[in-house]
Image: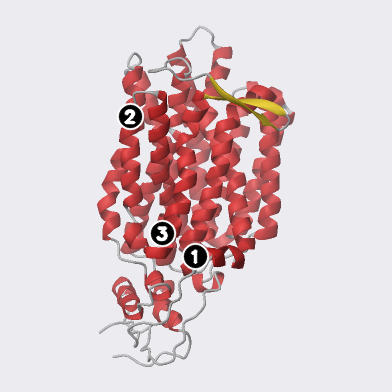
């Protein structure tokens, strides 16, 4: 039995059960399907850190020294072949979000979802087979396109399926899988180095190729996900199809009345002109965060290995690298992984905006301590503790919130585009940082680099407070000012009555 719905927009009548639903098995299955992509993304992006640390003393093929010297902050920064290997995938990850984000809005989430995983699988396997410096850079770039494409697709799909109460927690959990991917890379590298210390050529190839396994495993699951009800309704105008999917997911009878509704497509120019303050806020926040996060994450093994050489000059290069990986594992276990899950626990209660500016603030303070008290860097445990705070609060705050907020502030017609735009600019920041990080440490020293990163984080506080709105506990149609479809011409039986 059904009854007439209250007067109001068709989107409210159809989508209300989805917004009000409890977290279900479907939600957690979607979290797993999407999250395994981010597990793989983090593994593939950050495992290169131990590989380039290995290339510092073992090279399977010729890797150029200085490729070019570029002016940077009034000095000359040499770009090395090692730096380009480190940054190649991140350059690809800066391209992927723009492409896949726009395609996700133009032709559908379901149509695109999973294709980015095929690119990732190909890039990982080809990287493991690379026979030259040029081949490795090219294949890592291809890998990065697939990784970048995963950002707008997984986050948008999870956000559009989530309920209002738990949306931040569900989308944040997808992103938190990065922590496990990062840790897996460190543990696998340490295990291989300890077990096969004389098989370095095989080790780096296994490390780069292993990322293909989880990506291939989730491809089929991704292709089976239904189109999101919000895309079906707001972009394709398929009211009955949207109602059918919502009913199937929630167990609530949802009757649209009309077969279809008017659903104008959004243009890219319209996106840029209508939403530029939000575009600037979300993209600049992500850009600033990734400058610090990717540079420090990828170069931590190299930096700690260099410190280890000073402490224990009698150890071999492989032994120093194992020490570096042990410190990296400690930082990851104690700070990086917990940060993700603290964010998941707090994001729907404390709010996105608060977590973001507080996270940036603590990062700024920690980097400033390391920069203005440089003796701490050589002290081992105190350095790990303070340095680890940048990862802990980075993950509690901006690393997670910059991923969540873009899926909430743009209408459905532009949601994947907006998330892709923010993610793309984030990875541009990551690319610049990764490419120049070693060069700037050479110019400024570790302390000078820490001071620079402290300034970047402080700017992040200002950008967040000025340009990022709070979106917790509000429906996507409210946080994004989604234009409502009129109810005229159709009757809408109750969207809150259980099926019989």
How far separated are the C-alphas under marks 2 and 1? 36 Å
Q: Which mark lies nearer to you, 3 or 1?
A: 3
The image shows residue 257, relative to residue 46, as above or below, that is below
Q: Is residue 125 left or right of residue 404?
A: left
The N terminus, quarter of image? bottom left
- The answer to whether 222 appears left or right of 235 in the picture is left
Q: Earlier in the sequence, mark 3 or mark 2?
A: 3
Residue ID for mark 3:
103
The kind of secondary structure element at disc 2 is: helix
State if disc 2 and disc 3 touch (CB < 8 Å): no
Q: CA distance from mark 3 to mark 1?
A: 10 Å
Q: Position of residue 375 (x, y in %)?
A: 70, 22
Front: mark 3 or 2: 3
The answer to whether residue 177 is seen in the rendering is yes
* Quadrant of residue 221 within the rendered picture: bottom left
Packing grade of label 3 (10 A; few <14, some 14-19, many >=20) is some
Residue 414: numbered disc? 1
Q: Is residue 43 visible?
A: no
Query: Which residue is located at x 69 percent, y 35 percent?
Result: 452
Q: Earlier in the sequence, mark 2 or mark 1?
A: 2
| Image coords of residue 72 (percent x, y) | 68, 32
Q: Which mark is residue 128?
A: 2
- Identified at 45% across, 57% down, the residue is 101
């Amino acid at each position: 039995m059904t009854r007439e719905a209250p007067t109001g927009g068709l989107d409210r009548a159809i989508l209300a059960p989805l917004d009000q639903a409890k977290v279900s098995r479907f939600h957690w299955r979607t979290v797993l399907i999407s999250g395994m992509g981010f597990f793989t993304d983090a593994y593939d992006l950050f495992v290169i850190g131990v590989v380039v640390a290995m290339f510092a003393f073992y090279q399977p093929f010729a890797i150029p020294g200085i490729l070019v010297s570029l002016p940077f902050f009034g000095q000359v920064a040499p770009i090395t072949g090692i730096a380009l290997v480190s940054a190649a995938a991140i350059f690809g990850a800066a391209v992927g979000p723009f492409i896949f984000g726009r395609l996700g809005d133009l032709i559908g989430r379901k149509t695109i979802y999973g294709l980015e995983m095929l690119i990732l699988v190909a890039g990982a396997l080809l990287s493991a087979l690379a026979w030259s410096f040029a081949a490795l850079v090219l294949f890592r770039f291809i890998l990065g396109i697939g990784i970048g494409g995963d950002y707008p697709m997984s986050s948008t799909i999870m956000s559009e399926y989530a309920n209002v109460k738990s949306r931040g927690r569900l989308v944040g959990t997808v992103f938190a899988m990065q922590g496990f991917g990062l840790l897996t890379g460190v543990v696998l590298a340490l295990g291989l180095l300890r077990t096969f210390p004389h098989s370095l050529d095989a080790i780096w190839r296994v490390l780069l190729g292993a990322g293909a396994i989880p990506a291939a495993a989730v491809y089929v699951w991704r292709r089976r996900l239904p189109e999101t009800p919000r895309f079906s309704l707001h972009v394709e105008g398929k009211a009955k199809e949207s109602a059918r999917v919502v009913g199937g997911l929630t167990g609530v009878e949802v009757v649209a009345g009309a077969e279809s509704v008017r659903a104008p497509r959004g243009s890219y120019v319209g996106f840029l002109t209508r939403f530029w303050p939000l575009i600037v806020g979300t993209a600049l926040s992500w850009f600033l965060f990734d400058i610090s996060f990717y540079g420090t994450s990828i170069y931590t093994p190299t930096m700690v290995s260099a410190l280890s050489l000073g402490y224990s000059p009698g150890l071999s290069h492989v032994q120093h690298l194992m020490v570096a990986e042990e410190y990296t594992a400690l930082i990851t276990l104690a700070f990086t992984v917990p940060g993700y899950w603290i964010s998941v626990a707090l994001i729907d209660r404390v709010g996105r905006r608060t977590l973001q500016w507080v996270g940036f603030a603590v990062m700024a303070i920690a980097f400033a301590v390391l920069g203005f008290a440089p003796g701490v860097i050589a002290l081992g445990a105190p350095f790990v503790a303070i340095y680890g705070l940048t990862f802990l609060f980075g993950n509690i705050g901006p690393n997670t919130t910059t991923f969540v907020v873009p899926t909430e502030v743009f209408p459905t017609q532009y949601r994947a585009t907006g998330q892709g735009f923010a993610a793309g600019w984030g990875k541009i920041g990551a690319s610049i940082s990764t490419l120049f990080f070693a060069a700037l440490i050479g110019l400024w020293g570790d302390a000078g680099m820490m001071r620079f990163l402290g300034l970047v984080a402080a700017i992040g506080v200002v950008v967040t407070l000025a340009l990022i709105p709070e979106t917790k506990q509000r429906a996507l149609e409210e946080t994004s000012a989604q234009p409502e479809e009129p109810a005229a011409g159709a009757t809408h039986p109750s969207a809150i009555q259980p099926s019989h």
